Amino acid sequence: MKSLACELPATTGVPLSRWSHAELARELMIRSVVGSISPSTVGRILQGDAIRPWRYRSWIFPRDPDFAVKAATVLDLYARVFEGEMLGTGEFVVCADEKTSIQARCRCHLTLPPGRARLMRVEHEYDRQAAVAYLAAYDVERGQVMGRCDDTTGIVPFGRLVEQVMTVEPYAGAERVFWVDNCSSHRGQRSVDRLGGEWPTLRLIHLPVHASWLNQVEIYFSVVQRKVVQPNDFTDTNEIRHRLAGFEDRYNSMAQPFDWSFGRDDLDKLLARIDNHSIQAA
C-alpha cells in the first residue's frame, strides 16, 4: 500500500492526478492486494509514516545561470555589504516591485460586520469595476514604505515611483541608493543605464528570474493582501487608492524592519540541495 501511495497514479495507468484514501482502497482491491479495506484503514496505515499523497506543493528550479551570483549580491546588500565593502551611513537599500491588477469588486449587498457567534459576511456576487496597480519601494533598514497607485505597470509608472523616492530625503542627498528589483517590465542593462543616467546615485540591482521570494517588498505586499485587499469590497478604484494610501501611513507609523535572517550560507545550502535533487531525479 505504501509503495502504491508513493507513486503518481498516472504512471500506474490510473487516470488520477493524486491519490485519496478512497481511491487507494479501491485500487488495492482491484489489484487483489487485499480482499477488502476501508478508506479510514488506509488513512491510519499511511499516517504511521506521514504519507499524504493527496497533498502537494509547487516548486521551481532556478533557470538563471547566474542565479547564485545575483542572489548573493542582494543578500550581501541586506547585510549592508556591496562588492566586499560595508555600506556607509549615506547609503541605502530599497526593494521595489509592482502589485498588479488590484480590482475593485463592488458587492451586490453590503458587507455585514462580525457579530456574536457570526463571522463577517461578504456577498458572493459583485459588479466588476476597473483595476489599479500598486507600486511600492521598501527601505530594508528603516522599515518604511513609499508607494503609489497607477493605472498600469511598466517603465513610465516605475519611473514615477523612482522619482517619488529619489526626490525626498534621505534619498535625495544620499551617496548611493541601491534599488533591488524583479519587475519583468524593466529588466536588463538598458534599464540599469536608463535609471543610472536619470539618477546618478541610483544603482539598480536585478534579482534573478523566479527570485521574488528574495525581495523584501513582497513581504509587505503579502501584508497588504491580507489586511487591505481581502475581502475585496471596493466601490471603485478611487476607494482602493485611498485605502492603500491610508494603510501605508498607518504601517509606516509603527513599522519595524523585517527580521531577515536568510544569508549567503543559507543560499549555498539551498542550491546544493536543489543540485542534489536534480542529480537524483536524472
Image (cartoon, rainbow, N blue to C red):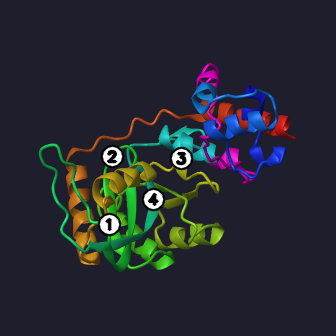
SS at circle 1: loop
171 vs 160: above or below: above
The CA span between labels 4 and 1 is 33 Å
Quarter of the image with the C terminus is top right
Graded by Cα atoms within 10 Å as few (under 14), some (14 to 19) or many (20 or more), the crowding at tag 4 reads many
Q: As shown in the figure, which amino acid type bears the numbered disc 3?
A: Leu
Q: Is label 2 in contact with label 3 (beta carbons under 8 Å)? A: no
Q: Which residue is pictured at 67% across the width and 30% down the height?
A: 269
Is disc 2 placed on a helix, strand or loop? Answer: loop
* Mark before the other along the chain sequence, 2 or 3: 2
Q: Which residues are magenta?
A: 44-70
Instruction: Please state which of residues 272 and 44 is positioned toward the viewer in this rendering.
Output: 44
> As shown in the figure, which amino acid type bears the numbered disc 4?
Ala
Residue indicated by mark 2: 143
Can I make out residue 271 in this image? Answer: no
What residue would you read off at disc 3? 214
Magenta-drawn stretch contains 60: yes
* Front disc: 1 or 3: 1
In the rendered image, which residue does mark 1 sit on?
A: 124
Question: In terms of sequence position, does the residue under pointer 1 or pointer 3 come before the other?
Answer: 1
Mark 3 or mark 4: whose residue is earlier in sequence: 4
Tell me the residue at 31%/74% (across/down): 126
**Mark 3 burial class by Cα count in 10 Å: few <14, some 14-19, many 20+:** many
Looking at the picture, which amino acid does disc 2 mark?
Gly
On residue 96, which mark appears?
Answer: 4
Q: Amino acid at mark 1?
A: His
